[in-house]
């Protein structure tokens, strides 16, 4: 209870500082509008159909991207995690591909795929595959050999061991990977919308508000909404993790 | 014999959410210079609280502690503590040698620190392990490092909080003899808190028997066992067995299984409560400490 | 060594397959690796001998990019570790700051690019601001976690030996928090690379990102691919250097307790 009060006080303090800073004249007021102005704008936006459509476009792209990357990375991770030879062989390739920042692919992706939603989803998937992949591989590394042996002693076949032992015990780690992937996806989606334009979305809204009409209050309102989405996604997945895999001490995976 | 440590009408009450817990009711005793005193009592009877008030980590709610005549307010200058949990008390990122030197940085130059550390490590039989990291040593050896670190500090009073409770029986015997040896050589004043009756009889010049919650002194026994104690002969001697029986009776150990079990349960409950209250207290002290210095 | 050889053999094999595949497909979007390598040489390794064969583009674009990336990352590291360790040692302060930090961390950093553009104009300051704001949170929150992990026994040990404040912070809290801090530094280093590219794509006249944009406008696919490969190599190299440094700094740790490459904030 006390922690909650303090947290709220902290938020209030943050808003007050922002308000004072915005009104102090250190930065022109139209550059950094105070929260009272942004708040009013935000309330107005929540009733604005075009804005809501932007938000939905981004959230939908986020869901698709997270779903796709999970669908790609988990099976791949299971293969790489359980067949050491494949993993060692592909390691150089993986280590070369992973550090390529997805935003560096924007120019190429625009030319290849146009500026539609499939382009931003593709880039988001590219970025989001890695955390899930690595966490899945890591989970299999951490798999208690005793569990596997116990299952094999009872005559369980290889495939069944994979599905009844390996997958359940990998779940907490996979969920951690998905949570990280979701955050990454959001960053990439907003970046692509911001930089490439074209397809509707929150990033596009922010860029339009900036370059078209120079309305920083709208920019900040959009930013706040983006932050709220990020918070909800992270918090939601964390809750799911706590609830579904409460049996695991490894909830949160290995950070 | 002059009193090195004197504890007068000491009492401590923790304020917890669901009321107050009195950990120590009314304690008075003295420890003379060069004495080794064992404080023995049932688990959860407030032994740890006593140790923390003596070391100045917590301020008692009543009474006073003084070390060679000076009232203890905050941690006194020349006091060292060996904690039970050696793996947490040692710094894993420092070698054995550097762990021993760590508290000396404030007062000694580099060369002196090094010499002092080498000397005490030799004394506890770890001369060859100076460059190793704590995790490369066994539990007993790690506790030796903690003892060496405390000795290098040259404290007027050495406090030990269940120092040998986390090592195996064999190692415990070795460490007990090590403690007796260094106490003899350095003429250190030592206060050992323990729940092990045998250990208290074997180590102590005197034994303070504490009652369970809240703690008060039930008996103050002088141990008259011949000077070089020896793990097998001493423990077999009649005097040892008699004293051990007396302490056990004072602690109500033989009171029948039923009663004992009930008592232990209550003890555990209160121990848990206190542990919580104590944690809160420590973090409060920590916060105050920070507030004071920042 | 055998595995090492095997790994690079597979890598080489894939490059050869890529070469052959693109040679057969003959698709302008996917130039052959040899063509990309040629483009890269033309772009960055065609300089005079006294510049070690490095072309002017390296000095105009590549080095400034790396400078901004490392600069922003270093600034964020200093701020993040200092604030994070302070917050981590005070439960009360963290209760006040926690929700604000959680929210700020959730904001996708590129969303603030327009704000920084307006406040700082196009240029190094705006790019640094983007990087610093974006990578600060993983470092800060990991430092909080690390500083929190100092156990009570270590605190009491230090208190009993009357360890001075500075020695307590530098000698106990920082080393105890170091594994977590390094985890944060690793995440934020790869994030720095992303934000460096984002801030350069917004519109600057120099940097690897802006070179990519130029190549896109001119439909110069080999140059574009060369830029992408360069960024990949850069990311790989930076991560390798940091890992080596981390291994040295944390050599006291028993076995390799290192957290895996994907680390959460």
Image: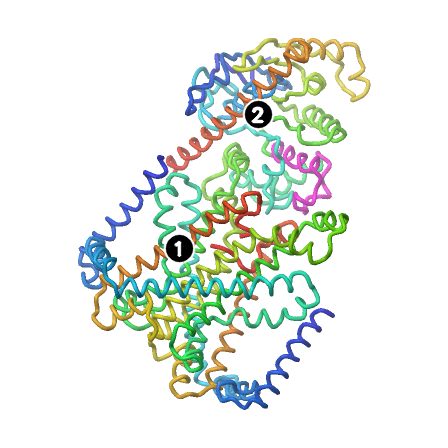
The answer to whether residue A44 of the structure is visible from this angle is yes
Task: From the viewer's side, name the closer residue of C132 and B89.
Answer: C132
Quadrant the N terminus of chain A occupies = top left
Left or right: where C223 falls relative to B199: left
Q: Which residues are magenta?
A: B124-152
Label 2: few (<14), some (14–19) or many (≥20) C-alpha neighbours in 10 Å: many
Q: Position of residue B263 (x, y in %)?
A: 60, 15
The answer to whether residue C60 of the structure is visible from this angle is no
Q: Position of residue A108 (x, y in %)?
A: 44, 80
Kindly indicate the quadrant of the structure image that contains residue A46: bottom left
* Residue at mark 2: B156
Q: Position of residue A22 (x, y in %)?
A: 21, 56
Task: From the viewer's side, name the closer residue of C21 and C16.
Answer: C21
Left or right: where C60 falls relative to A43: right
Taking the magenta stretch, the answer to whether it contains residue B137 is yes
Task: Give the distance between the C-alpha atoms of the residues marked 2 and 1, in whole angstroms.
Answer: 43 Å
* Residue at mark 1: C79
Task: From the viewer's side, name the closer residue of B291 and C30.
Answer: C30
Kindly indicate the quadrant of the structure image that contains residue A212: bottom left
* Point 71% across, 43% down: residue: B129
**Helix, strand or loop status at disc 2:** loop
């Amino acid at each position: 209870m006390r922690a909650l009060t303090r947290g709220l006080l902290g938020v209030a303090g943050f808003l007050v500082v922002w308000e004072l800073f915005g009104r102090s004249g250190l930065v022109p007021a139209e550059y950094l509008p105070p929260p009272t102005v942004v708040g009013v704008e935000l309330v107005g936006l929540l009733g604005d159909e075009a804005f809501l459509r932007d938000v939905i476009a981004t959230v939908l792209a986020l869901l698709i991207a997270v779903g796709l990357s999970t669908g790609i990375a988990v099976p791949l991770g299971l293969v790489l995690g359980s067949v050491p030879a494949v993993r060692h062989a592909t390691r150089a390739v993986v280590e070369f591909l992973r550090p390529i920042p997805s935003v560096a692919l924007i120019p190429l992706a625009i030319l290849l795929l146009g500026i539609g939603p499939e382009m931003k989803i593709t880039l988001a998937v590219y970025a989001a595959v890695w955390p899930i992949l690595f966490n899945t591989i890591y989970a299999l590394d951490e798999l208690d050999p005793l569990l596997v042996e116990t299952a094999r002693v009872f005559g369980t076949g290889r495939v069944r061991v994979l599905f009844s032992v390996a997958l359940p015990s990998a779940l907490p780690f996979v969920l951690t990977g998905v949570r990280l992937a979701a955050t990454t996806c959001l960053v990439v989606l907003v970046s692509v919308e911001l930089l490439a334009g074209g397809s509707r979305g929150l990033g596009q809204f922010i860029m339009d508000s900036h370059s078209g009409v120079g309305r920083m209050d709208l920019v900040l309102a959009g930013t706040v909404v983006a932050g709220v989405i990020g918070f909800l996604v992270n918090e939601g997945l964390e809750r799911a993790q706590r609830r579904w895999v409460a049996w695991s001490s490894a909830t949160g995976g290995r950070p | 014999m002059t009193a090195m440590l004197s504890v007068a009408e000491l009492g401590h009450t923790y304020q917890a959410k669901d009321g107050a817990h009195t950990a120590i009711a009314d304690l008075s005793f003295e420890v003379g210079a060069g004495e080794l005193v064992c404080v023995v009592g049932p688990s959860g009877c407030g032994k740890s609280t006593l140790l923390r008030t003596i070391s100045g980590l917590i301020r008692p709610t009543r009474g006073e502690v003084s070390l060679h005549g000076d009232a203890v307010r905050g941690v006194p200058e020349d006091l060292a503590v060996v904690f039970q949990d050696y793996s947490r008390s040692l710094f894993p990122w420092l070698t054995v040698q550097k762990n021993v030197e760590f508290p000396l940085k404030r007062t000694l130059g580099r060369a002196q620190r090094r010499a002092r550390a080498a000397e005490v490590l030799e004394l506890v039989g770890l001369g060859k392990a100076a460059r190793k990291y704590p995790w490369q040593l066994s539990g007993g050896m790690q506790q030796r490092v903690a003892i060496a670190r405390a000795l290098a500090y040259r404290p007027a009073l050495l406090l030990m909080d269940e120092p040998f409770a986390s090592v195996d029986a064999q190692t415990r015997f070795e460490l007990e003899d090590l403690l007796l040896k260094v106490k003899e050589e350095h003429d250190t004043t030592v206060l050992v808190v323990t729940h092990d009756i045998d250990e208290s009889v074997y180590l102590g010049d005197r034994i303070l028997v504490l009652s369970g919650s809240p703690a008060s002194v039930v008996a103050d026994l002088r141990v008259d066992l011949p000077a070089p104690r020896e793990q097998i002969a001493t423990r077999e001697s009649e005097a040892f067995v008699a004293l051990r029986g007396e302490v056990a009776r004072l602690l109500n150990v033989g009171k029948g299984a039923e009663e004992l079990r009930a008592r232990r349960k209550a003890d555990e409950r209160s121990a848990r409560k206190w542990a919580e209250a104590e944690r809160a207290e420590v973090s409060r002290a920590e916060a105050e400490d920070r507030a004071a210095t920042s | 060594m055998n595995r090492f050889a095997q790994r690079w053999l597979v890598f080489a094999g894939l490059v050869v397959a890529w070469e052959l595949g693109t040679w057969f497909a003959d698709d302008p979007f996917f130039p052959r690796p040899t063509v990309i390598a040629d483009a890269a040489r033309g772009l960055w390794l065609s300089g005079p001998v006294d510049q070690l064969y490095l072309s002017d583009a390296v000095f105009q674009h590549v080095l400034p990019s790396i400078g901004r990336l490392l600069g922003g990352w270093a600034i964020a590291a200093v701020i993040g570790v200092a604030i994070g360790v302070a917050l981590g040692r005070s439960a009360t302060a963290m209760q006040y700051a926690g929700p604000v930090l959680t929210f700020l961390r959730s904001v996708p950093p590129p969303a603030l690019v327009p704000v920084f553009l307006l406040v700082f104009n196009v240029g190094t300051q705006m790019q640094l601001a983007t990087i610093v704001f974006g990578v600060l949170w993983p470092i800060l929150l990991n430092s909080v976690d690390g500083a929190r992990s100092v156990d009570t026994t270590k605190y009491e040990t230090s208190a009993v030996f009357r360890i001075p404040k500075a020695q307590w912070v530098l000698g106990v809290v920082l080393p105890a928090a170091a594994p977590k801090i390094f985890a944060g530094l690793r995440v934020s280093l790869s994030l720095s690379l992303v934000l460096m590219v984002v801030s350069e794509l917004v519109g600057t006249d120099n940097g690897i990102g802006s070179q990519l944009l130029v190549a896109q406008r001119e439909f110069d696919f080999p140059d574009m691919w060369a830029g992408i490969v360069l960024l990949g190599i850069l990311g790989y190299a930076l991560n390798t250097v940091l890992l080596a440094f981390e291994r040295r700094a944390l050599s006291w740790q028993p076995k390799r307790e290192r957290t895996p490459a994907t680390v959460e904030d």
